[in-house]
Image: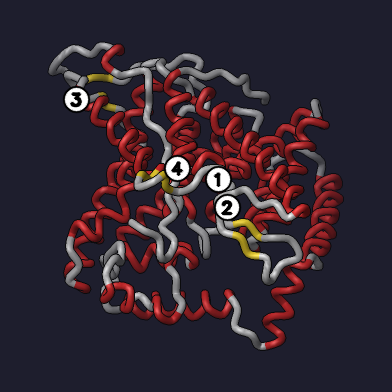
Amino acid sequence: MRVKMDYNKTCIFLGVCWLFLEQGFYLLPEKIGLVSLRDIAVLLLVGYQLWFYLRRPALPRCKGDRFVLLGFSFLLLVLIAAVMAYFHWDQGFLSSILPQRYLIAIFPLYFPLKSAIQEGKVSSQQLLSGILLLGKVELVVMMVQFFAQFSGVYFLTCDYNSAMYTFTRFGIDGTTMLFVMFYEISNLFRRGKKTVRSLLWIGMGCVFFFLMCQTRMTLLGICAAVAIFYLTLKTGIRKKMAVTLVMGLAAIAVFHTTLFQDTIYIRQSGARNTFDIRQSAISFYLDELKESPVFGKGGYPNSVRANLDRGKSAGYNLNDNGIFGFLYLYGMPGALWAGGMYWIMLKKGRKAIRQKENSVYLMFPVYLLAVSATEIHWYWIGSTALTTVLFWLILQHPSDANPQPCQVRPSGSQNSSDLPETATGKERRDFSEGGSF
């Protein structure tokens, strides 16, 4: 399936907010003077939602959409976590809530945008086109940086690490680029047309994730998503066995890359590495949860006492330990929330690929689940959180050729013009350790 690049004011607004959160493809600094680009995105997102609710005589009722429940229930998680942080660390409510302001502005955004889709003001196809466009532009920027580094030129405003790697490692999440890669892989196998274009984007994605991102769990997640995708293809068993053999040989080749061999060398030499630190951190978080197994320890840790209690002095970083750090903060309610999100996405993704040609609907949730042991970028990175919410909308409305308007409560009339054309954007915020809130 080839998506026609079709946009409107809503998509443009969302794209602008996404650029603020992503620091303009990492071409802009995090702050311009005293103004944070990501906080500008938050204000735009919140402003759009306030516009949506204040200008409506009645709220739409959209029954049966569990993503709506996910979006609003995250606010309850934040409230519970703030109470537990006060109980465990005597941390003020404002200190707990402010670090989570990006997610507070993003996850509830699903409901207003869903209403915009149902009223025909924007389509899920336009949202998909927007994600693909942003991902492709970012891929081009990354390729320019990749080749520029050999001349000693580094123009991206992200973290760099060249001490342990053959190529410089860039601290970029790349969710939209991953989305493009999965989309083109599906196009390549299912259509068999325009293979040169698809191979070009796939090749650029491989350069970024294998030579620039260089994250082990990301690579394993990509392999898992591609493997699941291939199993969904309607091909003969012999062909599947042959391709599986080729994929196995490719995995062996990847295993012998510098990234994996350096990891093996570090472990054999006895040096302290990220694997050991993460294993110790996970054990620490699980032990700490025994003190408060139901509601977790609270969050977000934003005080001296809280940071000491969560093991920061020992080098334990919540954002490096995936779902285990999330459980440490939110306890059982957080486990139910995250588990529900993965289940709904996988279920709807499986259903969507039966109706659509492209398998990105299933590959993306499989990837998010596969890397969740150490990476939950939908929580720590604002831009990825926004991309995830937009993906929820695409999953819920895989085909919006005949959109049906929301049902409105009896009290008051509903006019589609009450919803502005401009929709809220996405925010990119990294809650990485030591970040300013």
Which amino acid is tagged 4?
Leu
Q: Residues within 10 Å of mark 1 (few under 14, many from 20)?
A: some
Q: Residue at x 23, y 13 (%)?
A: 414
Q: CA distance from mark 2 to mark 3?
A: 37 Å
Which amino acid is tagged 3?
Leu
Q: CA distance from mark 4 to mark 1?
A: 9 Å
In the picture of the structure, the residue carrying the numbered disc 2 is 172
The secondary structure type at the circle numbered 1 is helix
Q: CA distance from mark 2 to mark 4?
A: 13 Å
Above or below residue 87? Residue 229 is above
Going by the image, does 254 lie left or right of 279? right
Which amino acid is tagged 2?
Ile
In the picture of the structure, the residue carrying the numbered disc 1 is 26
Closer to the eye: label 3 or 4? 4
Residue 330 % position (x, y): 31, 62
Q: Decide: marks 1, 2 in contact (CB < 8 A)?
A: yes
Closer to the eye: label 3 or 1? 1
Q: CA distance from mark 3 to mark 4?
A: 26 Å
Q: Considering only order in the chain, which callout, 3 or 2, is on the residue closer to the N terminus? A: 3
In the picture of the structure, the residue carrying the numbered disc 4 is 21
Q: Considering only order in the chain, which callout, 4 or 3, is on the residue closer to the N terminus? A: 4
Q: Considering only order in the chain, which callout, 1 or 4, is on the residue closer to the N terminus? A: 4
Q: Considering only order in the chain, which callout, 4 or 2, is on the residue closer to the N terminus? A: 4
